[in-house]
Image (tube, rainbow, N blue to C red):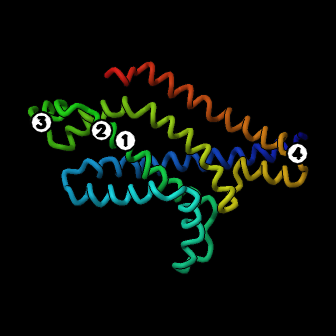
Amino acid sequence: MNSQQALFLLQGLEGTVILSLLTFLFGGVVSFVVALARISPFAGVRIAVATLIYVLQGIPLLVIMGLCYFGPSLLGVQTVSPLFAATLSMTIYSAAFLGDIWRGCLEAVPKQQWEAAETLGLSRWQRMWKVILPQAARMAIPPTVGFMVQIIKNSSIASLVIGYADLSYMAKILNNSTFRPFVFFGAAAALYFIISYPLSAGSRYMERRLNVGNR
């Protein structure tokens, strides 16, 4: 592999990192709203959001990505950038799964904590922000970091569906022009490992540190 080819792969890595960061940002915000809606005191809100989440969880990410990229043309939008479509679809994917993870963490906080906060005269939002969220956040850190790793790897689907120029896409382009799959896909695999392993290791460390399973 020469320097120009290596640079080509690094440009793809940049695309993967950008897409992953945007997904973490927007997906995190939407997932938090979903988690709160899932434990809403209003039954209608809980049922509506739960139904939507169950539907989205049953649809492959590849299909969601295709709908986000080609679907806007039905509404008269002529051009949708691959980055926008990939970010939108992966944000939806994150909301469907990460939102459910965070909902589980919120519900895992013992009911007695809610009751104790209520006896102090705190409103529901005060109980949430001052008592429940700090405890739920400790439980949510390991699975959230693990989900981030899945986001990084699943971002490669964007290169298959909409031609987003990520690491997998660049490796495929180089392979098509040189017919050296082990070199370029092997290099891409190594780069995915380099950016994913620290997150996986950090997740395991935090899980041991927080000892979530025994709390």
Against 131, residue 86 (above or below) is below
Secondary structure at badge 3 equals: helix
Q: Which mark is residue 106?
A: 2
| SS state under label 2 | helix
- Residue 173, image x, y percentages: 81, 54
Q: Amino acid at mark 1?
A: Trp
Alpha carbons under labels 1 and 3: distance apart: 22 Å
Mark 4 lies on a secondary structure that is: loop
Q: Are marks 1 and 3 in contact (CB under 8 Å)?
A: no
The amino acid sitting under disc 4 is: Arg
174 to the left or right of 211: right
Label 1 element class: helix
Label 2 – label 1 distance at C-alpha: 6 Å
Contact flag, marks 3 and 2 (Cβ < 8 Å): no
Could you say where residue 59 lies in the image, as x and y percent from the top left? 49, 59
Where does residue 21 sit, x and y in percent of width and height? 56, 45
Q: Quadrant of residue 207?
A: top left
Q: Residue at x 50, y 22 (%)?
A: 205
Disc 3/disc 2 C-alpha distance (Å): 16 Å
What's the distance in space between the residues labelled 1 and 4, CA to CA?
A: 43 Å
- Badge 1 or badge 3: first in the primary sequence: 1
Q: Are marks 2 and 4 in contact (CB under 8 Å)?
A: no
Disc on the earlier residue, 2 or 4 = 2
User: Dividing the picture into quarters, in which one does residue 138 lie?
Assistant: top left
- Read off the residue under disc 3: 118
Residue at the spot of label 4: 180
Q: Marks 2 and 4: which is nearer the front? A: 4
Q: Are marks 2 and 1 in contact (CB under 8 Å)?
A: yes
Hey, what amino acid is under mark 3?
Glu
Which residue is identified by label 1? Answer: 102
